[in-house]
Amino acid sequence: MSGDDHDDLHLDLHRAVDELGKYAIVINVKSEDGVSKADVLRFVNHIMKRSVQVCMENGADIVGHVKSFVWSSEGNIMGSIVDAAQEEVAFKDALPVESLKEFEFTMHVIVHGIWDDVVRGLTRSILDEVFADYDMDFEIVDDHYEVEKGMDHH
């Protein structure tokens, strides 16, 4: 067995044990006119719920945890989903201003039943759809999923 075959088998064994798909994305968000805090909260709820929905529609059977962070120089907002049936994102709001012109949005998606690359593809596939509902431009600045770093821990 070659080294690459061994690494692939080892990664498959890890996945068979945890069966979790994990993905994290970092997005820079800008709006020339500014986005109200209410719309930022609505956006976070929308993108997180839509990510869960598309994962559940494509093979995930339970949500491990989906969390997000809105970071700005003015403050931050954290969001959390722990159940696919959760009606609204649970927020921890530490943003004392009523609008933002730019912020960094980070979202971590952990679901059971589909692999990391599938979670990544599904999450990225909803971005244009979600952002179309808001007066905001976005740029993906980073993303992380197990396929790229699966063997790094060895």
Image: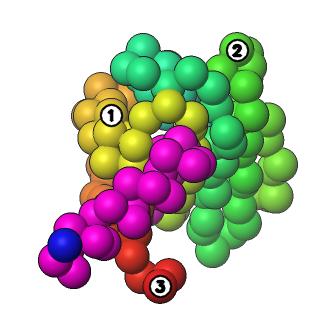
The magenta stretch spans residue 34 = no
Q: Earlier in the sequence, mark 1 or mark 3?
A: 1
User: For mark 2, does the 10 Å Cα neighbourhood hold few (<14), some (14 to 19), or many (20 or more) residues?
Assistant: few
Answer with left or right where residue 33 lies relative to residue 89: left
Secondary structure type for disc 3: loop
Disc 3 to disc 2, C-alpha distance: 37 Å
Checking the image for residue 154, the label placed there is 3
Kindly identify the amino acid type of the residue bearing the numbered disc 1. Answer: Leu
Q: Can residue 80 be seen in this snapshot?
A: yes
Say if 36 sits above or below 15 in the image: above
Nearer to us in this view, 109 or 115: 115
Q: Earlier in the sequence, mark 3 or mark 2?
A: 2
Nearer to us in this view, 140 or 111: 111
Residue at the (71%, 35%) spot, across then down: 81
Kindly identify the amino acid type of the residue bearing the numbered disc 3. Answer: His
Report which quarter residue 26 is drawn in: bottom left
Nearer to us in this view, 20 or 28: 20
> Mark 2 — residue?
85
Q: Which residues are magenta?
A: 2-26
> Mark 1 — residue?
122
Q: What percent of the width, then of the height, locates residue 140? A: 30, 59
